Image (cartoon, helix red, strand yellow):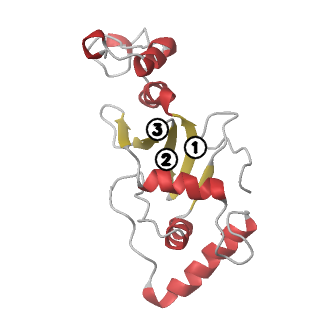
Amino acid sequence: MAVGEEDTVGARAGELSIAFSTEELAVLCQLLALPPVTPCGDTDQPPEPAVPGRRREVEDTARRSLRARGVLGADECAVASAVAELLRLVTAPQVTVRVVVQAPGSEIHSCRRYALSGPAGIDQVDEQGVQRFTPFAAADVLVRLADATGLGAGEADPDAPGGSPGSTGPAVTVGRAALRAAVGHPPPDRAA
């Protein structure tokens, strides 16, 4: 996928997103002199580098892929500005939110990481070892959290006890307008 193409796998329909392998991220962070990108998955630790004997081969393959997708220029030193800004935000955000959702009684879970700086946010998700990044307006972070956790309006199952499968408590749903308002307006006791 070229930079700026719509890709709806792992992102909402109509949103632009881009995905990178661990090796591609390592090459990009090295070129941009950034710390490694922390993967969104079972660990908060950056992945180990490629096997030393094959490191050069793996990096060359990653560089070819990045060039073919328009992320790297022909000289292999110029990184597309949108990708560079995305990675700068992801590696040094003002706020990071990590959300792990696990169904009751299940080993299967999903993980998302939200990196926020100023008006911008990046939604990061692990898709079988590939990290997908989707930019969004930081004001929408609560809506994204609600959607990722199933707490968004209309997500509860009214026929299940408590409103959702396996739940024993009351159903929780939060309207999108209320979530957006919560970001834009501090509680009265914190108003300046």
The location of residue 67, given as percent across then percent down, is 71, 70
Most distant residue in the front direction: 192
Left or right of 116 in this view: 74: right
Task: Looking at the image, tell me whether mark 3 or mark 1 is earlier in sequence order.
Answer: 3
Task: Looking at the image, tell me whether mark 3 or mark 2 is earlier in sequence order.
Answer: 3
Q: Nearer the viewer, mark 2 or mark 1?
A: 1
- The residue type indicated by label 1 comes to Thr
Q: Is residue 154 visible?
A: no
Between 110 and 138, the one lying in front of the other is 138
Q: Nearer the viewer, mark 3 or mark 2?
A: 3
Give the tally of numbered discs. Answer: 3
Quadrant where the image shows the C terminus: top left
Residues at marks 3 and 1 touching, judged by CB atoms closer than 8 Å: no
The residue beneath circle 1 is 134
Q: Is residue 4 visible?
A: yes
Q: Nearer the viewer, mark 3 or mark 1?
A: 3
Query: Which residue is located at x 75 percent, y 75 percent?
Result: 74
In the picture, the disc for residue 125 is: 2
The residue beneath circle 3 is 118
Q: Is residue 83 above or below residue 166?
A: below
Between 33 and 98, the one lying in front of the other is 33
Q: Is residue 120 above or below residue 38?
A: above
Residues at marks 3 and 2 touching, judged by CB atoms closer than 8 Å: no
